Image: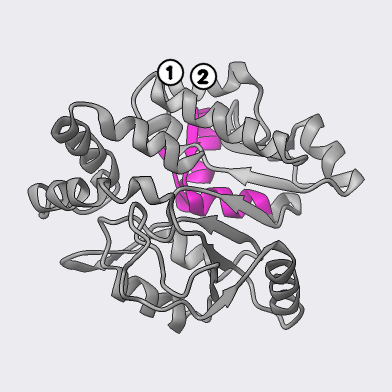
Amino acid sequence: MNERLLVSPEVADALTQGIPVVALETSILGQGLPPPHNLKAARGCEAAIREEGGAPATVAVLDGRLRVGLSDAELERIAAGSVKVSTRDLGPAMARGSAGAATVAATMRAAAMAGIRFLATGGIGGIHRGHPEDQSADLVELARSPVAVFCAGAKIILDLRLTVERLESLGIPVLGYGCDEFPAFYSRHSGCPVSARVDGSAEAARTLGAAWDTGVRGIVVAIPPPAELEGAEEMARRAVADERDLAGADVTPRLLARMAELSGGRSLDLNVDLVV
């Protein structure tokens, strides 16, 4: 195995025993949510996976290595202060010994290196509204790494139509888990159809296996958000309108901060509920 990759004993044992392993990103821990909501979300995701009989594999850069599976103390290190790390940043972050919070793209890369097929996150990146040149590395990595990303669609800050079109052009299947429409993070409705619908875990597993057998790499499995989160959609749209000129890596943290301001902090709890 690559000497730069360090897999925790829990994750290594699970992979050996055939226990389902789910990779988790840490950008929400390092930059996406403020304390204490960030650690609450990270710990909640890990607990939810363990409760279902799986093993969480939270990904980050620490002490010069790409880590797959973190202790609680290591989660706290990322929460206390870390840089956002996408695929392009992995080498520099490891060389400098930085504490790096992994994006979805970086987490996909780590998962593929470790032999992990599943990743869970709130929403993938895509193409930003008004900035079609600003394309998330998540889309590129989906075309490279054989990992299924389970999410509530793409973040509402994005141009969802262009994002779905880009996924199609990259040959990335978008499976709707019990839905025909690509979710819009807080909302079940975007107006964009998925490429195929799957009903239940058995059909999803068969479809993923068949796709991978044909050489398909990344796959998006879109799961509608809980109905009680629908009320957050308008709040998110107001935040997008207020910050419409933003582009680049700071977009998501700025918009989450604006939503928290507009909601008096209620949006932070909603984000935790969505992710977990």
> Label 1, label 2: how many angstroms apart (C-alpha)?
5 Å
**Left or right for 250, reference 21:** left
For the rendered model, the colour scheme is: one colour
Residue 65 in view in this figure: no
Q: Which residues are magenta?
A: 84-111
Residue type indicated by callout 2: Arg
Q: Residue at x 74, y 79 (%)?
A: 210
Q: Residue at x 48, y 33 (%)?
A: 100
Answer above or below: position of 194 versus 185: below
How far from the left and from the top, in percent, is residue 274?
A: 43, 43
Q: Are marks 1 and 2 in contact (CB under 8 Å)?
A: yes
Disc 2 designates what residue? Answer: 77
Tag 2: Cα neighbours inside 10 Å, few (<14), some, or many (≥20)? some
Hey, which quadrant is residue 28 in on the image? top left
Magenta span includes 122:
no
Quick one: SS at disc 2? helix
Camera-nearest residue between 154 and 83: 154
Quick one: SS at disc 1? helix
- Say how many tags the image has: 2
